[in-house]
Amino acid sequence: MEQKKRMSGQERKEQIIDAAIKVFSENGIKGTKTREIAEACEVSEATIFKHFRNKEDLYRSIIKKIRKVHSHELNVFLTRPKSAWDVLKITVLEILREFEEDPSFLRLILYSALEDKKFAFNFIEENMFGKMEIFKKIIKMGIKKGELRNVDPDLAAQMFSDMIGGYCVSQYILKQTKPLDNKDIAETYVDIFLNGIRK
């Protein structure tokens, strides 16, 4: 009988983080017990505390993991010789794809904001929601190339992030919006953001 390969410490840590995202997004951070996370990844609670001091430490590790992924995406986007329109559209399509496949992180953001200000602050501090840092860099790039007006990149990025974030909550959490093709959604949001609705 073939023996199951034993996980390395880092692999086990990643497994716990992935399980925690799912459980936190279903029960909230305060409503989740470490025992439930342990059951979700079929380990003991002692194993969880071997890798993380407490739930808050585990939560911070979730943020770091997602920030690392987003930082990689940012570097990839900024090396592409495309217009601000194209890069914004590609970014929105990626966000829609991620939340459509797994809305767990989106639910986790909402729980964080409702349950505890310090958890919500962690998301804001790390610029996680709506990939704010990516939007800001794209807008700065567009201004520098003369494609966009000289506006405040932070405020413009916040506005665009709120637009996309609002749609994602409505579509993937509340199920209130009419299902449309993601490409059409991305093009419409980018068009309205960059061109407005004035005739």
Image (cartoon, rainbow, N blue to C red):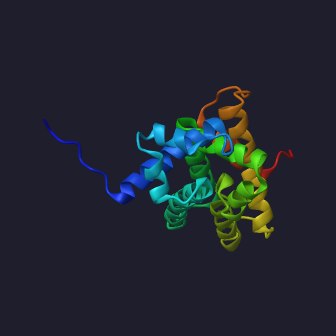
Q: Is residue 114 left or right of residue 74?
A: right
Q: Residue 102 in the image: state x and y as whole percent.
A: 54, 38
Residue depicted at x 41% and y 43%: 43
Image quadrant holding the C terminus, namely top right
Above or below: residue 4 compared with residue 117: above
Name the outermost residue toward the left: 1
Can residue 68 be seen by looking at this rendering? yes
Q: Is residue 113 left or right of residue 50?
A: right
Q: Residue 70 in the image: state x and y as whole percent.
A: 55, 59
Q: Residue 24 in the image: state x and y as whole percent.
A: 61, 42
Name the outermost residue toward the bottom: 144
Camera-side residue of 12 and 140: 12
Camera-side residue of 103 and 176: 103
Camera-side residue of 173 and 130: 173
Q: Is residue 86 left or right of residue 190?
A: left
Using the rendered view, name the quadrant where residue 108 is placed: top right
Residue depicted at x 69% and y 60%: 122
Above or below: residue 144 compared with residue 58: below
Can residue 183 be seen by looking at this rendering? no
Residue depicted at x 66% and y 45%: 29
Residue depicted at x 69% and y 69%: 140
Q: Is residue 57 left or right of residue 16?
A: right
Above or below: residue 67 compared with residue 37: below
Name the outermost residue toward the front: 46
